[in-house]
Image (cartoon, rainbow, N blue to C red):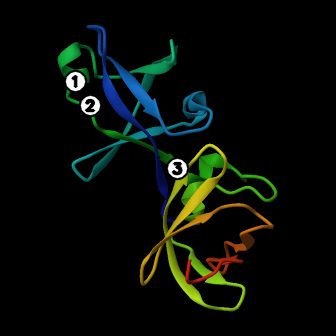
Amino acid sequence: MIETRVVVGRIAGHYGVRGWVKVASFTEPREKILEYRPWYLEHDGAVQPLEIVGCQAHGKGLIAQFAGVADRDAAAALIGTNILVARESFGAAGDGRYYWRDLIGLRVVTVAGRDLGVVESLLATGANDVLVVQGERRRLIPFVVDDCVQRVDLEAATITVDWDPEF
């Protein structure tokens, strides 16, 4: 079985002179990234595992240090690198809850059976998440279960929505 890896963060900068880096976490809450192991770095299309020597919350952000990264120059070379973890490390999202990663790529159809396209990405708006659906045109559909979103079927790779296709 091929392991699926998901981007959960990015190296955002260096911290200090001993090889520590600033981590931009894409998890909610942001500290959740510290629970996932192992981490993999993705750089120029190559993915490699890395050993975490230390990681912690620092102020409003996170910092980490990796084996073999001992100075500021080595840390600076990692800036912009994606941090990935195995999808299997997430566990189940919970009843009626979904990881964004699991929704991307699903086909979106109306309750009347009209195909609207495929989920390209999601947006966090504060009030609710929004599906970005790309079909014959781009649509933004609120991800509000039992209102706009009637059914999510991960096995069939479809989301059924109560949405006017002309909107």
What is the three-letter code of the residue carrying label 2? Ile
Specify whether 144 is left or right of 146: left
Q: Residue at x 50, y 38 (%)?
A: 38
For label 3, the crowd category at 10 Å Cα-Cα, with few meaning under 14, some 14 to 19 and many 20 or more, is some
135 over 30 or under it: above or below: below
The local crowd at label 1, few if under 14, some if 14 to 19, many if 20 or more residues have their Cα within 10 Å, is some
Residue extending furthest top? 17
Between 110 and 55, the one nearer to me in the picture: 110
- Circle on res. 86: 3
Residue type at numbered disc 3: Ala
Cα–Cα span, label 2 and label 3:
21 Å
Identify residue for label 2: 79
SS at mark 2? loop
Which residue is more in the foreground, 33 or 115?
A: 115
Which residue corresponds to the image point at 82% horizontal and 57% vertical from the top-left? 95
Left or right of 128, for residue 85? left
Determine whether the residue tagged by mark 1 lies in a helix, strand or loop. Answer: helix
Of the image marks 2 and 3, the number of the one nearer the N terminus: 2
Q: Any mark on residue 76, and which?
A: 1
Where does the C terminus fall, quadrant-wise?
Answer: bottom right
Q: Quadrant of residue 110?
A: bottom right
- Identify the element where label 3 is drawn: strand
Give how far across and how far down residue 79 sits, in percent: 26, 31
Check contact, mark 2 vs mark 1: CB within 8 A.
yes
Which residue is more in the foreground, 18 or 93?
A: 93
Type of the residue with mark 1? Ala
Q: Is residue 74 left or right of residue 18?
A: left
Q: With respect to residue 90, does 58 lie above or below?
A: above
Residue at (66%, 61%) from the top-left corner? 143
